[in-house]
Image (cartoon, coloured by chain):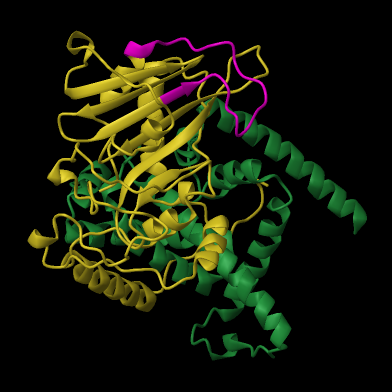
Chain colours: A green, B yellow
Amino acid sequence: MQATRLGIDESEDVTDDDLAARLRSGDVDAMGEVYDRFADRVYNFCFRRTASWSAAEDAMAAAFLEVWRVRARATAYDGTLLPWLYTVAGNVCRNQLRSQRRHAALRAKLHVVEEDVRVADHADDVAGRVDDERRMAELVAAVSRLGERDREVLVLVAWDGLTYEQAAQVLDVPVGTVRSRLSRSRGRLAELMDRTEEER
Amino acid sequence: MNEQHVPERRLSDEARARRRTELMAAVRADDRQPRRWVAPVAAAAVVAGLVGGGYAVGRTGDDEPASTNLDVAGSGSASTASTGPSGAPSPSSSEDPEPECEATTLSPEQEMRERMEDPLWEDPVIAPVLRSYRDVLVQHLDPQDEHLERKPSNVQTSGIPGCDFDALGTKLGWSVPGEGGLGMVQIEVGTSARGSQVELSFGGWRQVDEPRLPDGVTRAREVHNGDVTAVLVVRDDGVAVGIIADPLFGNNSTTGVTGFGFGVADLLAAAADPALALPQ
């Protein structure tokens, strides 16, 4: 499926190329505009890696800070900053997941009884968010059985909605490689899911 | 998988506004600070010897100072990665109101563990720079992009722990279709040729004659050691670039390639390319 264009505040007057150039020159206001334009996209990108809305929000915030730190590299591919933003956000999510795993291991050793903090959530759609997280966790678990290279390309194209060309930019591989990996990952995933169904 | 529903949501208005406020406060605070390199470089200096045949070496008695507009602390200074003072002032410290570097508080062992989990060549700042080095090499040495390893997977650096660094490089595999061996092209971009890893790898360097110097190059040296060729260029802007072409990538293979499709002139042209620069 292609990701929908969530909450993007796109002014016709300001292109991503303009924003990239202003970011590179250290324009603080451009950082705000990039955030306004892409916050939801990066938020959902991070959710698809963390399967947790709260973790995704933290990761998104960290990702935009990282974007500012590496602003000198800001580049719009094919007129969009998304591939570059996803590259930065992907690194942040990976680091966060590593930290979470270490924290989880420590917590397991300490036998901490985790309270269900969700009951304190003010949002009316707590149940929906929990459902989202459960579903996303299942999907992440499914694709995690693929090799890393195949998984990356599948997620970028099928979940994040990038074109083959944009995914190639993010992964720094030729477009042909994206196509072949995508084909292989789809086949492999279907095979894995069929096997899972049979085992149930 | 395409038929699977992938959940999507918008940030709540409250979260969006709060995160924006936090971000812009951090950005504005950072914008008032002088830009500097900190964490990745500190780790790089400590573990340089562990990755990709990395090294860290002191630069003393340098007679080839880099341009002062490189925005790199430690340029041409005596700096030893493992023992250099973390707060050592750079040569430009007299002009810099905030010369102090932020030293790492981690032990070398902790640094190593951190860095092994988070390879420097995947650092979001360094990785694009290494890729830009590869792009230059492809342009001059491998225009069909069929020989050079596609993604840098190692890094070599030198510098003062906790501060900026004064050299950055990588080794890329070079394969030849139909052959099982692996060659290597190493590139190093730094603030000085003297004491660089490329220079220290060989003896018997010879000056390249003036007519063979590419545009924008102040001086250049070359060396041939068996099948291995290396060049060392100092550009007009002070940047030093060394490139080694070795038909055997000894770190990763016991069998080399039969040769390269380029010559010394191509290596010099690549080294002279102004796109090669240290991270800002």
Quadrant of the rendered image containing residue A113: bottom right
Would you say B135 lies left or right of B153 here? left
Q: What residue appears at the point 54 percent right and 42 percent down from the top-left corner? A: A157
Q: Position of residue A133 (x, y in %)?
A: 62, 69
Secondary structure mostly taken by the magenta-highlighted segment of the chain:
loop
Magenta part of the protein: which range?
A: B244-265
Q: Position of residue A10 (x, y in %)?
A: 28, 52
Query: Against B18, is B40 above or below?
Result: above
Query: Against A135, is B72 above or below?
Result: above
Would you say A77 lies left or right of B26 here? right
Please name whichever residue, B73 or B203, is drawn nearer the observer in this view of the structure.
Answer: B203
Residue A65 is covered by the magenta coloring: no
Q: Answer yes or no: is residue B7 visible.
A: no
Q: What residue appears at the point 13 percent right and 45 percent down from the top-left corner? A: B68
Quadrant of the rendered image containing residue A140: bottom right
Would you say B183 lies left or right of B169 here? right
Q: Position of residue B249 (x, y in %)?
A: 57, 27
Quadrant of the rendered image containing residue B136: top left
Q: Position of residue A196 (x, y in %)?
A: 85, 53
